[in-house]
Amino acid sequence: MLAARDLAISFGGLKAVSGASLTVPAGKITALIGPNGAGKSTLFGLVSGFLKPDRGSVALEGREIVGMKPHAVCRLGMTRTFQIVQPFAQQTVRENIAVGAHLHIGGRKAALAAAEAVAQRVGLTAQLDKPAADLTVAGRKRLELARALATQPRLILLDEVLAGLNPQEVGEMIPVLRGIRDSGVTVFMIEHVMQAVMNLAEYVWVLAQGELIAQGLPGEVTSDEKVIEAYLGHGTAARLKAEAAHG
Amino acid sequence: MRSLASIAVLVLAVGLLPLFVSSGVTLGFVTMVLYATLLGQAWNILGGFGGQFSFGHAVFFGTGAYAMAVLQMRFGLNAWAALPCAIALGGVAGTLLGALSFRYGLRGSYFALVTLAFAEVFRILANTFDFTGAGVGLQLPLQEGAAQLQFATETGYLYLALALATVSLLFAWWLKHSRYGAWLAAVRDNEDSAAALGVNAFRVKLVAITVSGALMAAGGAFYVQKFHYIDPHLAYGAPISVEALLSAIIGGMGTVFGPLLGAVVLHGLGELTRNSLSSTPGASLVIYGALLVLIIMFMPRGIAGLFEGKR
Amino acid sequence: MKSDEKAYPPPAMLDPAILFASVLNGLTTGAVYALIALGLTLIYGVLHIINFAHGAALMMALYGVYFLHEKLGLDPYVSLPIMVPAMFVAGYALYRGVIARASHGKDENILLITLGLSIMLENAALYFFKSDTLTIDTAYTLSTVNIFGAMIAVPKMVAFFGALATTAVLLLVIGKTSLGRAIRACAKERQGARLVGINVDHVFAMSFGIGLACLGAAACFLLPAYYVNPQVGNGFVLIAFTIVVLGGMGSFVGALIGGFLIGVVESVGGLLLGESLGQIGIFVIFIIVLLFRPQGLFGARA
């Protein structure tokens, strides 16, 4: 579905992402995890056209998209959400979602109707006529998701849609995300909530200090020494192992 | 649909007005309100609906006004032919200015400043070259008659202003009910989000500034036909930029009828202060400036915001 | 146009003496421009707003200096200790009373508020003081000094050194005092400044006050060589914007260098192209910098 090769970008000498190559298989939920500051959102920005890489390439369904503007990438069927939600605050939930629906629907009425259908999928029906500014954090995350879905993407990049939600809200979102995957949309998500990653993801990439250090099934990745060290600090894996041997 | 009906009622009421009212003063007042509505709506399309605050909309007004005068006086064009040319030139000016400033990502204060600077450059240019009459300005020869788009009575100008203002109102109505309008609002509220949803923000803003420039130029062309005179300060000076922005903001940014309401309030106030303060220079503008500050402080959605219910 | 061009007198720039005098004149004006721009850039750097009322505030300060001279017989330079604090207080109060309240947290609103304020002030001046252009007469108004053959007016020389001295004081305040530290903290990271216990609203108001205090000083140095009328601020405000943009919004050193640069461009441009077209040079620089290098010549912000 999506293949990035040797992506790199630096900000004022600081290497944010250096030489990252990854693939996202079609029809599955793939997660991108890594400690804070690993460069996950930067990598999303590079893939979705918001940032221009210093080098490297990105192919969407075999088509080269590096250098394309975000709106053009979206037209090709890939859209993203933002970690810090960015609603059109002055507009209602319905109007917000309709902006996404307008990508393929010209008529205003038809787009507003489509917005309603999408709202149902993510559980926002009750809030349709509220101004987006009045939504709770959980509501805004759903809105972010709904707008992106309304563009009818084939691949959706979700940047921490579960962050800031309480356990109950996370529990409510998991079936929603599965439903998206089941409808045929490939999902590529940055996530911090490990319980959700273990639960949802079918494949995992691990990014640390701008480099991809591990990949595999969720179970494999979490027992990988490099991953444990990246999260918990150098030498941790050996110490854990030693402790396990003694105890 | 309600606002479309309101526009129809407005056109009908103003259209029939000359049958019942013969006072030139009253008709003149209504004409000037419609003219101010046109200017306000021109600003509103870019500033209110699009969120790009221009402080130099005079650049388009002046372009329309000078095009109208120069095409007639230097190239012998008939006024009816000059009018669409003037409007088109205003649109072109909008496209060029927009392409320059939006290509380089100018927003907020920077955009306001660059429009202001362009208006000032054009003012100095118009002030310098004989082609535009330099500092003396251009005096349009008096040739009354509908064929020359000059009228002996107020009624003719009233209809001309009504036609132009109606076009601007209809465009604003369309913005509220179309995909393009939704895109423009999305770009105003959050450009990154809009881009992620497939909206080409650059092109959307470019269309807005083009239409805005064309409507503003129509205002300039109207001014020349009505007052038969234009000079660099009238065309490109700060007062006209301020007038356009004031009626839109006071009436309600991003609303269909805001500019009309703002125009009524401003010209109504203008009449009042003219009578009570015996036309002391400055007095009415002090009140306008204060009104601008107060509106933003207490009614950021303008007068129209009061009617739009509890949002 | 073609036939007109031949009718112009031979270009005067070839005379190095005249060019030298023109550059010197430009530098003296540029110092005052720099002072005005410093106030503007300070406000921008801290508040991230462009104060459109900056020109109108300068105009009010000039009237202040004028009336202190006419009614109380105070020399403009003696008015300094009155005007600087007065403008500071006015700025502080204006920010606290109007601008902070009206913004509703949106920078765009502040843009419009300061525009509204400038319309009010300018027209209030027109209403009360009429549109007459006023000047003051001092013993030194017409005296000149000879600098390597160029005759420079004494008030302009005073303005040059006065503006430089004020700038030095301002830089000291910003660089060395605890208030300056708070201002720099707020300019860099307002949320962080709030978290470490800085009263951000107070610092904003102080910055606005200091920005206007610069105008108080500028007015005292300007008036002996200049004039005042209700529109006088307009000319300065666009020039000050140009300098601020040129120097990089929020950069003090940039404003200083930009001020001198614009002063010289204006003076030499006027010499070569004539008064009216000479001004265009400034705006063309302005537009080009805004479009191609909005971070300014000396700004580092990406």
Image: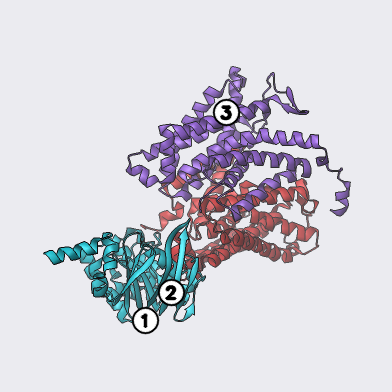
Chain colours: A cyan, B red, C purple
Chain under numbered label 1? A
The residue drawn where x is 66% and y is 48% is: C283
Residue sitting nearer the eye, A98 or A57:
A57
Q: At label 1, which amino acid type do we have?
A: Ala
- How many numbered tags mark residues here? 3
The label on residue A241 is none
Question: Quick check: do tags 3 and 1 share a chain?
Answer: no
Label 2: state its secondary structure.
Answer: strand
Residue sitting nearer the eye, B197 or A38:
A38
Residue B112, above or below A107? above
Label 1: state its secondary structure.
Answer: loop
Name the residue carrying label 2: A4
Name the residue carrying label 1: A26
CA gap, disc 3 and disc 1: 68 Å
Chain under numbered label 3? C
Name the residue carrying label 3: C165
